[in-house]
Image (tube, rainbow, N blue to C red):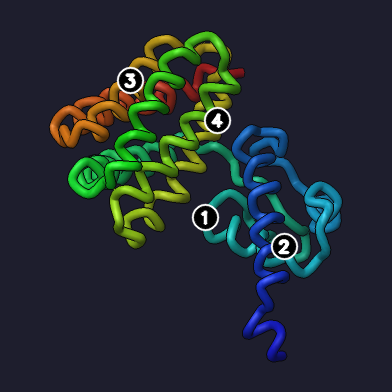
Amino acid sequence: MNAVLNPTPDNTSLAEQAYHVLEEQLVTLKLAPGELIAEKDLVDKAGIGRTPVREAIQRLSAEGLLQVLPRKGLMVTPLRRSDLGQIIEARRVLERLLVVKAAERATPDQRTALTTLATRIEAADDDLEVFFRLDQHLNDLLEAACCNRFLVNALTAMHSQCRRLWYLHRGRLNLPRSAQLHGGLARAVAAGNGAGAIRAVDEIIAILDALVNELDTLS
């Protein structure tokens, strides 16, 4: 009982590892929206013990990426236009606050890292996988710079759902435009330019909004 209520650092680390492995499978659509999957299959995919994987499943379920179906197992949450529309609506407001606070509060080291990352993102205008990886790094830097864990927690699940949307449309993305906008966002925050950061965020959210509206056209 004590081991469950007060997990050891090793158990916590394994649960975190399981979460990251499975979250990557979900957001990159290797586990397809609507797919039914057994807990044992997730244990096999994570390559980690059942208890840490169960902890990861609870977290992924709370974030809306997995659904627990009584007596049926687990289902990868479908990409629903109605859900994503609400996510975009909420993210538009929260993301503006995130980037403004990051622009205000970033440390000198974080500003340097953002400027360096901007150059790398802008250069990734023809490599989708590199762009996605750098975009995740940008999220991490902005979240650290904003110094508001409640805001970060509110956005975490939204980012995962939106990453699924990016991956679903990966063959249709205007990657050079996306790379330019994300690079511009990083530069604006690095320069302490909150208004410029908001403009970049609004354009990025507009792209996501358009992708949501295209969901019905996908086969």
Calculate the distance from the C-alpha at mark 1 to the C-alpha at mark 4. Answer: 20 Å
Q: To which residue does mark 2 refer? A: 14
Q: Secondary structure at mark 4?
A: helix
Task: Report the Cα–Cα distance between label 3 and label 4.
Answer: 15 Å
Disc 4 marks a residue whose amino acid type is Arg
Q: Which residue is mark 1?
A: 63
Secondary structure of the residue carrying tag 1 is loop
CA gap between label 1 and label 2 equals: 19 Å
The picture places residue 3, in percent across and down from the top left corner, at 71, 85
Mark 1 and 4 residues: CB-CB less than 8 Å, in contact?
no
Q: Name the residue that disc number 3 marks.
A: 181
Disc 3, SS = helix
Depicted 34 relative to depicted 5: above or below: above
Q: Position of residue 26 (x, y in %)?
A: 65, 41
Instruction: From the image, tell me which residue sits under label 4.
Output: 133
When the figure is inspected, residue 41 is found, relative to residue 124, above or below; the finding is below
The image quarter containing residue 129 is top right
Q: What residue appears at the point 52 percent right and 12 percent down from the top-left corner? A: 172
The residue at the point 63 percent across, 52 percent down is 66
First along the sequence among labels 1 and 3:
1
Q: Residue at x 63, y 84 (%)?
A: 6
CA gap, disc 3 to disc 2?
36 Å
Give the image location of residue 161, x and y in percent. Answer: 50, 41
* Of 104 and 49, the residue lying toward us: 104
Q: Which circle's residue, 1 or 2, is located before the other in the chain?
A: 2
Residue reaching furthest to the bottom = 1
Q: Of label 1 and label 4, which has the lower sequence position?
A: 1
